[in-house]
Amino acid sequence: MTKSDNEERRGRILDAAADLIVHYGYDKTTVSDIAREAGISKGAIYLHFDSKEALFEALILRELQIYTENWLDGLEADDAGGTMAGLYKNSLYAMNSSPFMSALFRQDARVLGNYLRKPGNLFQSLRQQQGESERYIFVKMMQEAGAIRQDLDAKVIAHVMDILAYGLVGMKDLLPQDDIPPLEDVIEGIAAIMDRALTPADGGNSEAGKAIVRQIVEQGRLRLEQMPQSGVKSG
């Protein structure tokens, strides 16, 4: 089949897929639905992707790349971006800027559907590549650079960070909407708590923290670029 280099159309396909899958879930969203939402023929989708699964995996990789770039942009623009509060705050803002990214982070079974049970799916491949907890490694690097306190267990810090992040995206499913404060207030509050709990007495080294994130983002970018996308047509 002829490969297509129409990047504008490819982007529209992925945008349409993201909207529909968040709303209806992966299992209930068909290629025909995506084509209709994108305003193209079903056949045009197959010029870019061999299957719905290949399209979905391309969408996951795109959203992960957008997330990391948004996180980096946010902390670079923040004078305190390399502190624990700045890093955490900008990470949460980047994650919550996309409903699809939020669903990915919490492994939402309604959104991701049967794909989660597929042997060798993209999430499993990413975890195999990462090996030891990436958040734990990040915390250790921040401690060694003097950006956060060194007298606390890095694994405990990493676990608490996971709890807070999962809770942020999952509480809407547990509490009435009226009981949940505005998202921006919650993120700012979490950042303030993390700052007071983890910043060294001297204020920490924000620039060292930013340098660590730049390094991690670059490693993540290279890893995502090297991920095999079965059934995705290049062009």
Image (tube, helix red, strand yellow):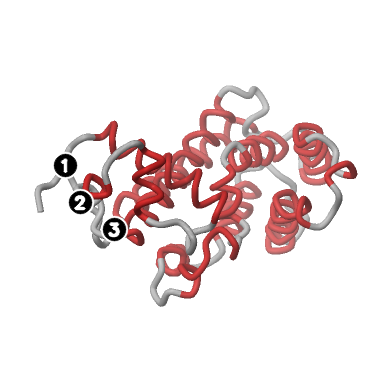
* CA distance separating discs 2 and 3: 9 Å
Nearest-to-viewer mark from 1 and 3: 1
In this picture, residue 217 sits left or right of residue 134: left
Disc 1 is placed on an element classified as loop
Which residue corresponds to the image point at 68% horizontal and 63% vertical from the top-left? 155
Residue ID for mark 3 = 229
Decide: few, some or many residues near mark 3? Use Cα within 10 Å; few <14, some 14-19, many ≥20: some
For residue 4, which numbered disc appears in the image?
1
* CA distance separating discs 2 and 1: 8 Å
Q: State which quadrant residue 111 falls in.
A: bottom right
Which residue corresponds to the image point at 60% horizontal and 60% vertical from the top-left? 108
Quadrant that contains the C terminus:
top left
Q: If you read the primary sequence from the N terminus, does the residue marked by circle 1 or circle 3 appear first?
A: 1
Q: Are marks 2 and 1 in contact (CB under 8 Å)?
A: yes
Residue ID for mark 2 = 233
Decide: few, some or many residues near mark 1? Use Cα within 10 Å; few <14, some 14-19, many ≥20: some
Front-lying residue, 53 or 160: 53
In this picture, residue 149 sits left or right of residue 212: right
Residue 178 on image: x %, y %: 88, 41
Residue 35 on image: x %, y %: 34, 45
Q: If you read the primary sequence from the N terminus, does the residue marked by circle 2 or circle 1 appear first?
A: 1
* CA distance separating discs 1 and 3: 16 Å
